[in-house]
């Protein structure tokens, strides 16, 4: 089941890669999709929201919760 989250501060492909890499480092089995236009990150693989939050914030972005 996939969960979507609002993430502020992502503006480019480099941002998307940073967020994706941070989440997959924290949860290697996660499938991550970033939508820059909507400022959302979708994570599939049963990753807890707090794990996603910590990874996103460690990458330097603002985690805003469920999208």
Image (cartoon, grey):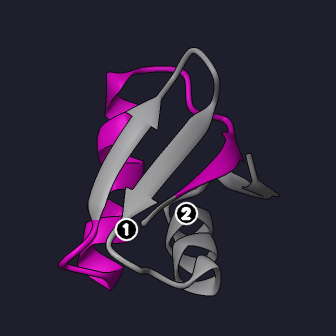
| Residue segment shown in magenta | 3-30
Toward the left, the furthest residue is 29
**For the N terminus, which image quadrant?**
bottom left
**Image position of 7 (left or right of 66):** left
Toward the right, the furthest residue is 64
How far across and how far down the image is residue 7, in percent?
67, 45
Give me the residue at 37% from left, 68% from top.
Answer: 23
Q: Earlier in the sequence, mark 2 or mark 1?
A: 1
Quadrant of res 27: bottom left
The label on residue 9 is none
Q: CA distance from mark 2 to mark 1?
A: 7 Å
How far across and how far down the image is residue 37, in percent?
57, 14
Q: Could you tell me which secondary element the residue under label 1 belongs to? A: helix
Q: Up-down: is 11 above or below 45? A: above
Q: Residues within 10 Å of mark 2 (few under 14, many from 20)?
A: many
Q: Residues within 10 Å of mark 1 (few under 14, many from 20)?
A: many
* Residue identifier under label 2: 56
Check contact, mark 2 vs mark 1: CB within 8 A: yes
**Image position of 56 (left or right of 46):** right
Give me the residue at 62% from left, 66% from top.
Answer: 57
Give me the residue at 47% from left, 49% from top.
Answer: 42
Q: Up-down: is 52 above or below 63? A: below
Q: From the viewer's side, name the closer residue of 10 and 47.
A: 47
* Residue identifier under label 1: 23
Q: Up-down: is 1 above or below 18? A: below
How far across and how far down the image is residue 35, in percent?
48, 27
Give me the residue at 73% from left, 53% from top.
Answer: 62
Q: Is residue 35 part of the magenta span, yes or no?
A: no
């Amino acid at each position: 089941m996939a969960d979507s989250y609002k993430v502020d501060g992502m503006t480019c492909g480099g941002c998307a890669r940073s967020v994706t890499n941070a989440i997959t480092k924290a949860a290697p089995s996660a499938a991550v999709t970033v939508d820059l236009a909507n400022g959302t990150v979708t994570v599939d693989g049963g990753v807890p929201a707090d794990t996603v939050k910590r990874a996103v914030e460690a990458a330097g972005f603002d985690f805003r919760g469920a999208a």
